[in-house]
Image (cartoon, rainbow, N blue to C red):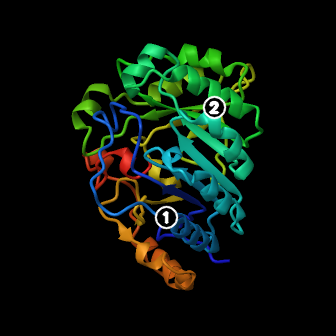
Amino acid sequence: MSVLSDPFGRTFPYLRLSLTEACNFRCGYCLPDGYAADGRPVFLARDEVRRLLGAFATVGMRKVRLTGGEPTLRKDLVDIVADAARIDGVAKVALTTNGTRLPAHVGPWRDAGLTSLNVSADSLDRGVFEAVTGHDRLPEILDGIDRALALGFDAVKLNAVLLRGINDESLPAWLDYLRERRVSVRFIELMRTNDNVAYFERHHVRADAMERTLAESGWVRMMRASDAGPAIEYVHPDYAGRIGIIAPYSRDFCAGCNRLRVTARGDLRLCLFGDHGVPLRALLQSDDDRDALVGLIASQLRLKAAGHGLHAGDSGITPHLASIGG
């Protein structure tokens, strides 16, 4: 089996696939006014998703993460998960969700073949959570997370975007949560996109201060798996859970890039903050187009840049994170 690589020797066993741009939350850093459909073509259909994943699997994809927007808004999500789990070579099928549908649906997702789960939870404080997301739904989300922990997932992770003046002093509460729960809480440095410049300037806080705090408190940095996401994870003997740090503004963040992205409309993105997309959808209409699809993907990898332009204030063509799945 051939494996995708770029001019910098990086390989790509990990694909992030957005299933929809729609979201039912109004997070201040992403869609503060909520999602508004633009009337353009519909998102990838189930068969298109199956063909896409099959092509990536032939060139080394071992892990796929289904993202959005909010992917659980797709009525065919269970079928898509099952399709992905049946593809030869795919060892891990992950989902990133805001967690609102966890209590009722996490069981069927697990039964369909979902292996790991990421839940966005920017605060354990109900009032702060509502202020960030626009919805007072933290209790049911936390209940859903506890249900997920009982189902034997390979990993259950929580994502919290670090926001200065909002949740950047919440580490003690998270430590209490982690003491007995085998989850990983990942603190994500706020990223500037084309639509959140003012919000970014008010609330961006560097993650390195938290990294120093963890090191001083006895947390130990772990080795990163080849198909892992961008988080640097820490463990501590007194805690069942882990802490991860995702710091896109840190030095050499892009050196370990191992993931590609495809939008809900079928465009390949070589970088979350790249300046162009490559339409793949025309080659997703028939199983007979797999070789041409693989060839197009491989040819584009030769154009992947060494890193993003965030340090220069360049967010590429990403208007907000819901448009590409983060």
The answer to which quarter of the image holds residue 105 is: top right
Above or below residue 253? Residue 50 is: below
Secondary structure at badge 2 equals helix
> How many numbered marks have been drawn onto this rendered protein structure?
2
Circle 1 is placed at which residue position?
45
Q: Answer yes or no: is residue 322 visible.
A: yes
Disc 1 marks a residue whose amino acid type is Ala
Query: Looking at the image, which is closer to me, 13 or 57?
Result: 57
Disc 2 marks a residue whose amino acid type is Pro
Rendered location of residue 225, percent (x, y): 66, 50
Mark 2, Cα crowd under 10 Å, few <14 / some 14-19 / many 20+, is some
Residue 176 shown left or right of residue 284 in the figure: right
Figure quadrant of the N terminus: bottom right
Circle 2 is placed at which residue position?
103
Query: Looking at the image, which is closer to me, 56 or 209?
Result: 56
Rendered location of residue 249, percent (x, y): 39, 41
